[in-house]
Image (tube, rainbow, N blue to C red):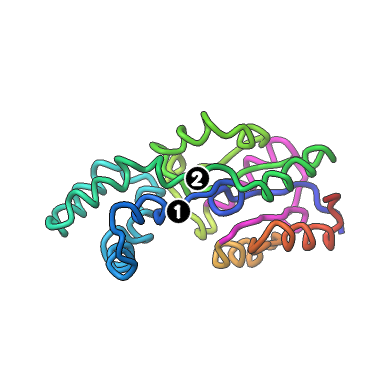
Amino acid sequence: MTIKAVVFDFGGVLIDWSPQYLYRELIPDDAERAWFLTNVCTMDWVIRQDGGQPIAEGTAELVEKFPEHEALIRAFYGRWHQMVAGVLDGGVATVEKLEAADVPLFGLTNWSDETFPYAWERYDVLRKFKDIVVSGRVKMVKPDPAIFAEMLSRIRAHLPEIQPHELVFIDDNLINARAATELGWHGVHHTSAAQTEATLRELGLPV
């Protein structure tokens, strides 16, 4: 078995992003905060912006639905940068080991096109990839097979003969990792850098 390229998800693998970082300040009560993030600013709502819906439009829709929570809803993207704590050192170290071994690296992330530039400008690890598919730019989101097809097409611009079984995809979302596996890739569910590196070694990668 020969792996010819590795594709990384970003949030939860390389970038430490969580709404909790902001909303612990805005909603100190654990139960109230959990209710808000489960029922108002839900991940299903976030995915719509990640899929290309303008932030202003998504925010307006939610404010209309939950007017009593307007200030908290507007804070989600208005103070979005406070949800980003920085890089995850373990994941970055994995990238650096693969880069040092000349393994081609690519990125596939569910991320709003409006907020991605914030991370791009601040975190050098994102510049280590030959190409990055940002869901908000292509208006598709994982686990849609179409976004994996887009990624494969981009990879083939660099490695024309590569086949799905020669690709590894690393994601902290199990559903996304499984989607890659179903398409013939080696989907790796990232739970820790140590576990991911152990899996990569089993696949013959030098980490």
Circle 1 or circle 2, nearest the eye: 2
Q: Position of residue 12 (x, y in %)?
A: 56, 54
Which amino acid, by three-letter code, is at mark 2?
A: Ala
Q: Is residue 41 left or right of residue 160?
A: left
Q: Residue at x 70, y 56 (%)?
A: 193
Vertical order, 165 against 97 (above or below):
below
Which amino acid, by three-letter code, is at mark 1?
A: Ser
Q: Earlier in the sequence, mark 1 or mark 2?
A: 1
Q: Position of residue 38 (x, y in %)?
A: 33, 67
Q: Is residue 94 left or right of residue 76?
A: right
Secondary structure under the numbered disc 2 in the rendered image: strand
Secondary structure under the numbered disc 1 in the rendered image: loop
Q: Which mark is residue 85?
A: 2
Q: Which residues are magenta?
A: 147-172
Q: Position of residue 121 (x, y in %)?
A: 51, 29
Could you classify mark 1 by the number of other residues whose Cα lies within 10 Å: few (under 14), some (14-19), or many (20 or more)?
some
Q: Residue furthest top?
A: 121
- Closer-to-camera residue (184/192): 192
